[in-house]
Every structure is written in structure tokens, then in C-alpha cells.
Amino acid sequence: MRGSRSVYRCMKRSNFDFLIVGTNFISDNFTDAVRRLDGVGISAVLSRRKETGEAFAARSGAERVFTSLDEACAAYEEGAFDAVYIASPNALHIPQSEYFLGHGINVLCEKPAAADEISLEAAIAAAERSGAVFAEAMRPAHDPAIARIRSALGEIGPIRSARFEFTQYSSRYDRFLAGERVNTFDRTLGNAALLDLGVYAISCALMIFGEPQGEIVSRSAFLDCGFEASGNALLSYPEFVLSVVYSKVCASGQPSVIVGERGSIEIDRLSEPKKVMLKLRGGGERELCPDALPNNMVYEIEDFVRICRNFGDPRQKAEYERYLDLTRAQCRLLGRIERSSGIRFGEDAGERTNSGTF
């Protein structure tokens, strides 16, 4: 058993409190999910600007507002919170995670936890050294819908084709087109359509089918600023090819679909499956997730809190390791697609190429 101070602390408390880093829409969704759970709360928020933090605190019910990492860590020593949920820009995920983990604080980091394997392993190593828990907030990894889809594959198989799609017209795209600099389309912050949206398709592919075999062929379309706006990737499996389609500047409204010789499974939204339909070729259909929750972030929070509270249980540690293995596999696959498509971050993005095979 890890002798983690942070794990021990949350075992001793009747309530499990989060510090939220970042005040964007995903933090509001996280707040909504927390409110649906007993024994879990939000006690603090960290924001670069005090007024922004105070506005979020008013919405979330957080009692304290911090503007620096040092200030937050000092408050942790006083018992202000039990874990951190990081929802800052992608480029800050690993530096902030390593900082908190270095202080023995449990971290739930919004996807993507890391853009490359070296950074991911550095964060995992930091967690190992301090005895804290480090996990990626990948919603479908905790949603029972994925297990139901896997279980239903035999009813429609053999699988012959699949298309996983996540296209969305960003709510900030019009502001970007009007000339405003918005974080969402700033490549220097580690943003790309692949990491922001395509990652859901990649993670679901890994959970349902495992790692692809052979080469990966991918293409990306870039805005003039070098930001990757959309892309396609072909993932090869022994009996079929899975097509991944993603975009931040257009939305098709089409479901993802798995097609077998005897039928198909349609998934409305990979990040939060609510309407998942199994349709048989000879007629007949049924809904696989009639009991889907309004906010499936509840599942990832429940799992994270349970692991933190019961890390001495070998079953919880094994579950934690499975989540880490998924994050590792996801990071490897993202890296292959990035290299194949020529996706770059930071100031070297202008050196990208538009196609390739890796």
C-alpha cells in the first residue's frame, strides 16, 4: 500500500473536496456532476485572475479562491481540499499535474492528460514518488455504455467497418474568424482538433477494439495560423478498418457507427453516449443505454474518489493501473497520428506537412 499523505487524508474525511484549476465550460460541467453526488464537494478554485475565480466560486459554491499554485498548496496543507481537478489549457496539464503531485496531492486531469509519452510518464513517475493518485478525466472510460457496446458486438459481428466521428462547430470559432485571439484556436497552448475532440474517438476505439495493427494513415486540415482544425485517420484491425473523423470548425450531426455482417450499433456522442442503438439486419432494434445519466462526468468522479479513498484495496489499485494503461495506449496512438498528419505545437507549427503515413 502506498503511504500517501493525500490518500490517507481523504480516508479520514467524511467529505471529499476538490480544488478546480480553470474556470471554463468544462469546469461548470464538472461542478454539475459533483452536485449530483453525495459526499463530494468543491471547496476551492484556482484562476489566474481573482475576479474570474470569484465569479466561478459564486457559481460552484467554492469557499476559497487562489491565484497561484503555491497559495493553493499551502491551503492543502491546512486541509482545504483533498484532490485537484485540472481543466486548464492543454499545455499546462502536465506542468500543473507534476507540481501538485510533487506535493502529494491527488490529481484528476482533464483530457488529454499529455500530448506525448515522455510527459505522461513523467507525471506518472511523480505520482509514484509521492504516493498520490494521477488519473486522466476521460469520460467514456468510466461510462457503462462502453462495456455494453463491447458486449453487443457479437450480436452484429463479424465486424466489417466502423466510423467514429466527433465533429463540432466550436462556440468560439466565430470570434476567431472575427480576428479575436481565443485560447481554443491557439496552438501554443497545446490545442488541436485531434487532442480536443479526436481524442474521444481514439480512446473509444482502444476501449472497444484494442490497439490497431499495422500502419496508420491520417490527414489533417489546418487554419492559416497553423492550428489543426480537422482531420481523418484510418486505424487497421484484422477484419476491418476504423475511420476516425473529427473537427472543431464543422459539425455533421452524424452518429458514430460500428457495422457487422448481422447489423450495426449507432452511438450518438462518443464523449457521453446517451442514445446507443443496436439495429439488426433482419429487422429489430433496441436501445443499449436507456438509463444514461444526464451528465456522465459523474462516473469518472465516482471512480476517482473511490480509488483515492480505498487505494489500499488491491482491486482499486488494479483498476487504477488499467486506467493508466489506457491513457498510455491513447498517448501512443495520438503520437502516431500527430506524426503522420504533421501536427505541430508551439512556434514550429508552421513547419507542418499536410499528409503522411507512420
Image (spheres, rainbow, N blue to C red):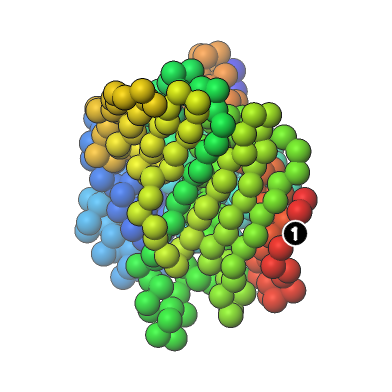
Which quadrant of the rendered structure holds the N terminus? top right
Residue occupying the point 39% across, 64% down: 169
Q: Nearer the viewer, residue 115 or 352?
A: 352
Which x, y percent locates residue 82?
41, 37
Which residue occupies the extreme bottom position in the image? 179
Q: Quadrant of the rendered structure where residue 236 is?
A: top right
Which x, y percent locates residue 42?
31, 45
> In this picture, is 229 found above or below 211?
below
Mark 1 — residue? 356
> In this picture, is 295 found above or below 324?
below
Residue occupying the point 65% across, 60% down: 219
Which x, y percent locates residue 276?
34, 33
Which class describes the residues within 10 Å of circle 1: few (<14), some (14-19), or many (20+)? Answer: some
> In this picture, is 101 found above or below 281?
below
Which residue occupies the extreme top position in the image? 314
Q: What element carries label 1?
A: strand
Q: Quadrant of the rendered structure where residue 271 is?
A: top left
Q: Please give left or right for residue 91 compared with residue 47 in the image.
A: right
Residue 43 visible somewhere in the drawing: no
> In this picture, is 146 found above or below 186?
above
Residue occupying the point 54% across, 63% down: 230
Residue occupying the point 42% across, 27% down: 263
Q: Which of 293 and 202 is in front in this view?
A: 202
Q: Please give left or right for residue 330 compared with residue 89 in the image.
A: right
Q: Quadrant of the rendered structure where residue 275 is?
A: top left
Q: What residue type is labelled 1?
A: Gly
Residue 218 visible somewhere in the drawing: yes
Q: Which of 158 and 151 is in front in this view?
A: 158
Count of all numbered marks drawn on residues in the image: 1
